Image (cartoon, rainbow, N blue to C red):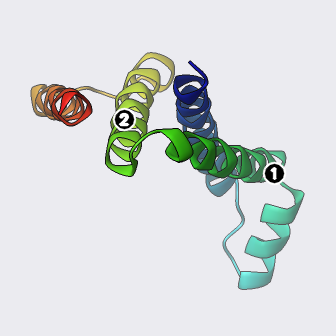
Amino acid sequence: MSRWLFLGIAVIANIITNFSLRAAVKSLDQTSPYSIILGLVQSPAAWIGGVGSVMLLISFMAAIRVLSLSTSYAILTALAICLIAIIESAVFGETVSAQKLAGLGLAITGVALVATS
């Protein structure tokens, strides 16, 4: 049970990290390297992304202690990609093309095949 819990936490941390870092980068003043570094240090979104990265690392390390790396990584990556696409579409109004849906379907199918082999 805990092995799936750690993997679930890793997926959620991955999503939090990606959206937080996206928000941090969009708000940066990119006029100089100094302003970029200062903007990141002062950005709450960048700090949330950093904490999410640490959560991702710790929970993924816990998951791969009891699950195979190929299964864990495939599930983590595919679920994060699919959930990010769904959230991005629902919250930010990103368009989801038929090609993107087909790719997400292939990712889910691939994970199912890897996880059951």
Label whose residue precedes the other's in the sequence (2 or 1): 1
Q: Is residue 10 left or right of residue 114?
A: right
In the picture, the quarter occupied by the C terminus is top left
Q: Is residue 15 left or right of residue 40?
A: left
User: Please, which residue is most extreme toward the bottom here?
Assistant: 33
Question: Of the numbered discs in the image, which one, if any, rests on residue 47?
Answer: 1
The residue tagged 2 is 75
Q: Amino acid at mark 2?
A: Ile
Name the front one of labels 2 and 1: 2
In the picture, the quarter occupied by the N terminus is top right
Q: Quadrant of residue 55?
A: top right
Crowding at mark 1 (Cα within 10 Å: few <14, some 14-19, many 20+) = some
Question: Of the numbered discs in the image, which one, if any, rests on residue 101?
Answer: none
Q: Residue at x 82, y 53 (%)?
A: 43
Give the percent coordinates (x, y) of residue 102. 11, 28
Q: CA distance from mark 2 to mark 1?
A: 26 Å
Q: Amino acid at mark 1?
A: Trp
Give the percent coordinates (x, y) of residue 64. 51, 46
Total numbered labels: 2
Looking at the rendered structure, the secondary structure element under dot 2 is: helix
Crowding at mark 2 (Cα within 10 Å: few <14, some 14-19, many 20+) = many
User: Please, which residue is most extreme toward the front here?
Assistant: 66
Give the percent coordinates (x, y) of residue 114. 21, 37
Q: Residue at x 34, y 29 (%)?
A: 82
Q: Quadrant of residue 3?
A: top right
Q: Residue at x 72, y 66 (%)?
A: 29
Q: Residue at x 73, y 72 (%)?
A: 36
Q: Is residue 94 left or right of residue 20?
A: left
Looking at the rendered structure, the secondary structure element under dot 1 is: helix
Q: Is residue 51 above or below residue 35?
A: above
Q: Is residue 60 left or right of residue 30?
A: left
Give the percent coordinates (x, y) of residue 59. 64, 41
